[in-house]
Image: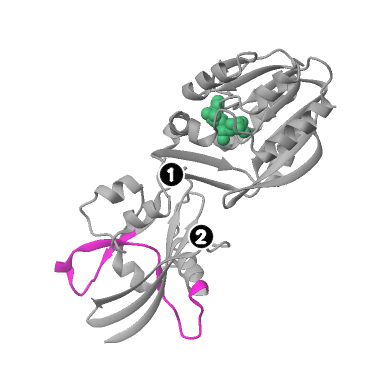
Amino acid sequence: MQRRRAARVILVDESGAVLLFRGGDPARPAAGTWWFTPGGAVESGELAETAAKREVREETGLEVTDLGPVVLCRQVEYEFEGTQFSQAEDYFLVRCEHFDISDSGWTDGERRVVEACGWWSCEALRSTKETVYPDGLATLLKELGISTVDSRDRRAVVREGYNRVSTTYRGDSETPPEHRLWIRELLDHLGEKAEVLDLGCGCGIPVARDLTGAGHHVTGVDFSDVQIARAKQLVPTADFVKADITALEFGAAAFDAVVCLYAIIHLPLEAQAPLIGNIAGWLRPGGRLLLTAGDTAWTGAEDGWLGGDAQMWWSHADRATYRGWLGAAGLEITSEGSIREGLGVHSVIWALRP
Ligand SMILES: C[S@@+](CC[C@H](N)C(=O)[O-])C[C@H]1O[C@@H](n2cnc3c(N)ncnc32)[C@H](O)[C@@H]1O
């Protein structure tokens, strides 16, 4: 029995799909084929991390800079081309942009063995009758909170997700500490009876409630039926519109301030810069934008969000990209910070329409 260490990589794209190869043992065609992740033997003196990156580069052409955590360690025994192996495997999780693999770095052995390659959705992995290694990959992905959202379904996933988690996400009279600080700062910037637009306003608590309470007029927009219904009930003094924030029309310079908290990150990236352009047009000169956006680029989905049965989807650009979009829209950043939420970080940006 030959002992081996192997480093394998579960590559997950922004839709939650996983890259797998299909192949078999050329010495045992009767054994059929199976699907497996990129990866291979750790060479003598090599670190598992180095081997994982090298194997992904050789087998797919992708340069991995951020190798994620080891999410599975297993010991397997198998036969390949007449040799029995006892192999200790570490599986790393790597999130990446979807890409078409290149086989230019394949060895002769890989060319003999690999017959196909494909991106698998989590649903397809759950229901397939084909053999997939490691065993239980679909369950592992579920435990890691990874799920697949087709690009056509993203908005529906977000809207339905907030319909389900509305009250878990925010109680009827809950004020997160960071919102309290932001509202206080915003009130300092507003004159009398200001017009404020709250994009992705949720249930209206606390932003619409506190701003209307201070004598301002708030127009809140959200596309979740449950969020808007609660907002109308909880803050009857504000106006709420059930709509997609990417499909709004307001007059030029209609608002003294625009608030968009934890909402732009639910739009596909290609819709985010145009929204910032629209916001700049809706602000009067001297008007303020308060925006929470991405800090590092990340796109993905989660099942069972907030402990319930909701699926959720996000897409963050990195902070420099948001700075660029705000600048291109003619908005001047007046201050910037960060806010931690769970394991993630958001940028908090205040901007001014000159
Ligand atoms: C994380 S919640 C934030 C709620 C509120 N801004 C706050 O900070 O408490 C995001 C809200 O944005 C809404 N949303 C996401 N994408 C949207 C879209 N394309 N159009 C309208 N609302 C959207 C969701 O329904 C949800 O209520």
Instruction: Provide the secondary structure element on which disc 1 rests.
Output: loop
Percent position of residue 182, x then y:
74, 35
Point 74% across, 15% down: residue: 254
Q: For the residue marked with disc 1, what is the amino acid?
A: Gly
- Where, by quadrant of the figure, is residue 346 drawn? top right
**Tag on residue 283?**
none
**Magenta extent:** 21-49
Query: Relative to 310, is 217 on the left or the right?
Result: right
Percent position of residue 295, x then y:
66, 47
- Which of these two is toward me, 267 or 37? 267
- Which of these two is toward me, 161 or 105? 161
- Where, by quadrant of the figure, is residue 315 drawn? top right
**Tag on residue 307?**
1
Q: Earlier in the sequence, mark 1 or mark 2?
A: 2
Instruction: Provide the secondary structure element on which disc 2 rests.
Output: loop
- Residue 238 shown in magenta: no
Distance from the alpha carbon under mark 1 to that under mark 2: 34 Å
Q: Which residue is mark 2?
A: 62
Point 73% across, 31% down: residue: 183
Point 61% across, 36% down: residue: 262
- Which of these two is toward me, 233 or 332? 233
Please identify the quadrant where the C terminus is shown.
top right
- Residue 40 shown in magenta: yes
Packing grade of label 2 (10 A; few <14, some 14-19, many >=20) is: some
